[in-house]
Image (cartoon, grey):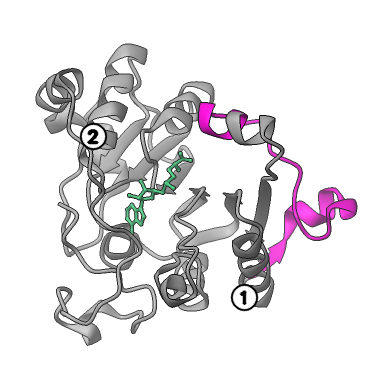
Amino acid sequence: MADHPNTANQDPNPSVRGDVAHPKAIRTFVKRAGRVTSGQAKALAAYGQQFIIPFQTSQLEIDSVFAADPLAPGRGSPVVLEIGFGMGEATAQIARQLSETRFIACEVHEPGIGALLKRIGELDLHNLRICAHDAVEVIDQMIAEGSLDGIHVFFPDPWHKARHHKRRLLQAPLVSRLARRLKPGGYLHCATDWQPYAEQILEVLSAEPQLFNKGAAADAGLGGYAPKPDYRPLTKFENRGLRLGHGVWDLVFERH
Ligand SMILES: C[S@@+](CC[C@H](N)C(=O)[O-])C[C@H]1O[C@@H](n2cnc3c(N)ncnc32)[C@H](O)[C@@H]1O
């Protein structure tokens, strides 16, 4: 599952790129150690088929995916893509809170996928589907341009070492492809607890001509960063960081 390449810095057109498993591709993730617990395995077996959207190399019919579920929000309701949901704590809370929005959430970490499926079962969520695949490929191949109302990227891997910076998800070529997939008025919301990455994200998003800094307009006193939007919950991880005095930077940009 996690053996797919990152194409963040490559040609945006997958048909030109051709071989999506190009050996030189740079991934934004590594397959983390961590075993699937029995609860997660049970959730994978019980809910995987209903809630995991298989990867495909053609555009996804988002309305059809949710139309199969009579309890899901109807056609035309907002669609938000999340990249890298980890264990899915924030994802499930947001989906519960924004029950009329449809969420497509990408992650490659199998215990995390199991954990989110478990939460989907416990909370009886119908407005959330999972892509258990490299989000970069999902974006390029499955998500139509102008189809998203929002994109969430919460605490993307910071890749601290300089030689790994090329693995960072939020770089200009991918940001441009993300922006194209937003509807006009759609938003890209990123959060990070690593200041140098926050600065890089701010620079890259500010330089993207399809986007403008909506969050900064709401509060000019944060130097381009946004106040945390109410829908993004404080996770256990973030709370612990805040107690230790670490900062968190939210960035909210909108498509023109
Ligand atoms: C630092 S964790 C943060 C997880 C979660 N958003 C949170 O706030 O706790 C980043 C996650 O992004 C996932 N990830 C990184 N690159 C990805 C990609 N290209 N496609 C899907 N998931 C990715 C990793 O597997 C990892 O679980």
* Depth order, front residue of 168/13: 168
Q: Position of residue 93 (x, y in %)?
A: 48, 24
- Decide which of tag 2 and tag 1 comes sooner along the chain: 2
Q: What residue type is disc 1 on?
A: Glu
**x and y, in percent, of residue 38 in the image:** 14, 19
Q: Secondary structure at mark 2?
A: helix
Q: Callout 2: few (<14), some (14-19), or many (20+) C-alpha neighbours within 10 Å?
A: many
Q: Residue at x 36, y 33 (%)?
A: 87
* Position of residue 38 in the picture relative to residue 128 (left or right): left
Q: Secondary structure at mark 1?
A: loop
Instruction: Answer left or right for 127 relative to 68.
Output: right
Note whether 19 is above or below 255 in the view shown: below
Q: Nearer the viewer, residue 203 or 102?
A: 203
Residue type highlighted by circle 2 = Pro
Q: Residue 5, how many percent across, how many down?
A: 23, 69
Q: Is residue 216 located in the magenta-colored stretch of the structure?
A: yes
Q: Residue at x 68, y 38 (%)?
A: 229
Residue with the mark numbered 1:
208
The magenta region covers 211-239
Residue at horizontal 23 percent and vertical 84 percent from the top: 17
Q: Is residue 71 visible?
A: no
Read off the residue under disc 2: 111
